[in-house]
Amino acid sequence: MYKTMAEKILSDKRGADVSTGDTVIVPVDFVFSHDGTMPLAIRQMESGLSTRKVYDPYKVAGVCDHASPSPSEKASNVHIFMRKFAKENKMPYFFENGDGICHQIVVEKFAAPWNIIIGGDSHTCTHGALGAFATGMGSTDIAAIMAYGKTWLRVPESFKIEVTGTLPKHVCSKDVILHTIGEITADGATYMSMEFLGDGVDAMSVESRLTMSNMAIEAGAVTGLCQTDSKVRAFLESHKRGQEYRTLAPDKNATYADEIVVEVEGMEPMIAYPHRVDNVAPVTQFEGVDVDQVCIGSCTNGRMEDIRIAAQILNGKKVAENTRLVVYPASRDILIRAMDEGLIKTLAEAGAAICPPGCGFCIGRTVALGDGEVALSTQNRNFKGRMGNDNAEIYLCSPATAAVSAITGKITDPRDGLRW
Amino acid sequence: MKRKGKILRIFPKDTNTDEIIAGKYKYDELDLEKLAVHTFESIDPLFYADASKTKNPLIVGATNFGCGSSREQAPQVLKTCGISCVIAESFARIFYRNCFNIGLPVIECKDMTKKVAQGDEIVVDFELGIIHNITKKEEYDFKPIPKFMQELLEAGGLMPYLRLHGGYRD
């Protein structure tokens, strides 16, 4: 039987061939949740299972990232509740305010090929870029996994996304995934495993692939897998986890429920306009729209290459007078490396507000928009009210488009260097 | 199992979990009763008040209902508002799973938003897989609920299921 990557991982975990549509109970390699989902998971353990004990403290993590650093008494009390639970269970992996976004922490420290990773956050699909079957679940599922170390999954159908060609300058993997979601729409891959294949993906850095896998959920997918290769091996080695590398690739004749070819040669920078992620158009269609706040960061685009391209574009330039720029490195590790490379200095000199690693602007908890304001952000969702204000508008774009638009104060195509 | 009630609202396609309950509230508030006051606040400010006044309210959605965040607070606040069943043309998968986990029955019925109107009295018969529209005197079939999810529903949710079986049955 020929298998997709999702079928391979789930068969491996079951120790038997599984196929699409089967419901399987599987062991979970790593489970994590954050300050938006962990408190409810703890409550469910208490009330539903009469326990507060995790099955293996080394396989469970908690992260304070959504309301971080805590902006309110209530959020601080939520953090106290989480800390107490972690301490009681002697969990070595509890991440504090400022350590970073849960997904980036898991990418750096835990995710590996052939793993099953479950997170109490929909963007857990991110880890598919490292070859892990990773998916987001709600707090009750997280509670069950924290207690038993297992979960149930329906083996998904797969949607093949074949990316071919070489990306033009200042066109990023974010543009590729926005384009793809625009094509297949917000429910185009409902409960499917999106499998990103082709020479266009092979040519991308691991960081660029993480951006695409991160947004698989925006098309309804359960996970977003990439093949593993020497780049994944080098990525794991750079985080001192080279021994965790394993090769993952689909069988040549694997069956896909659907497929799409995305030709990136000559692709334009893309934008998702309010209030839907699948409202996708070329940036040129929205050029000139005034922007109140430009946001660079999030689990989608807060990594080294994103901050590098922003600093490269903003080097020696100033943020436009009518605009604010906020930058959130995705983790403490990235913040430190960006400082070492001088990128933070460059961005600060250009007028950016440099914020502590965390979710920040993306969910409007620690940075919120005002009435009638327009944000241009590298995050993954532009739902109404997402950034803390129902009367604001959010456009999604790549870090290159964001950085260039911060200079002009208007939505701007990053390819035309003369205009900025 | 049957659910009888009145269709309180019909929501458009891709109704997302940020709309059901905004992120700005969920990080501060663990008390579901207090959180539920903000249900659908950004798109339907009267929802909570109307749900409180209605006996056995049900809601209907078009395709991809509950897309977006994994926040379980979304089905939790609906349940807290007294919603006894959600019927949509299709559901986003994390939301769908969360509903079964907390014992909130949800069913998928093709073209549902075209068949019914706000205020219709309906009875959902889970054994027969039929929705009876008492107001319109019509019947609609719905997609059978996957076996494992049916077991969850019968147990009253994932936690009671796990208590009953002492964990997952391999």
Image (cartoon, helix red, strand yellow):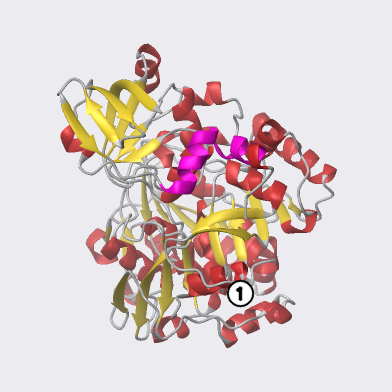
The residue shown at (15%, 23%) is B137
**Whole-percent x and y of residue A365?**
55, 40
Whether residue A82 is visible: yes
Which quarter shows the N terminus of chain B? top left
Which quarter shows the C terminus of chain B? bottom right
Q: How many marks?
A: 1
Please, is residue B98 above or below residue B93 in the view? above
The residue shown at (76%, 37%) is A51
Q: Which residues are magenta?
A: B146-163
On screen, residue A67 versus residue A193, left or right, reads right
Residue B150 counted in the magenta span: yes
Dot 1: few (<14), some (14–19), or many (≥20) neighbours within 10 Å? many
The residue nearer to you, when weighing B155 against A103, is B155
Residue located beneath label 1 in the image: A113
Secondary element type, mark 1: loop
- Judged from this view, the residue extending furthest toward the front is B128
**Whole-percent x and y of residue A7?**
49, 71
On screen, residue A311 versus residue B137, left or right, reads right
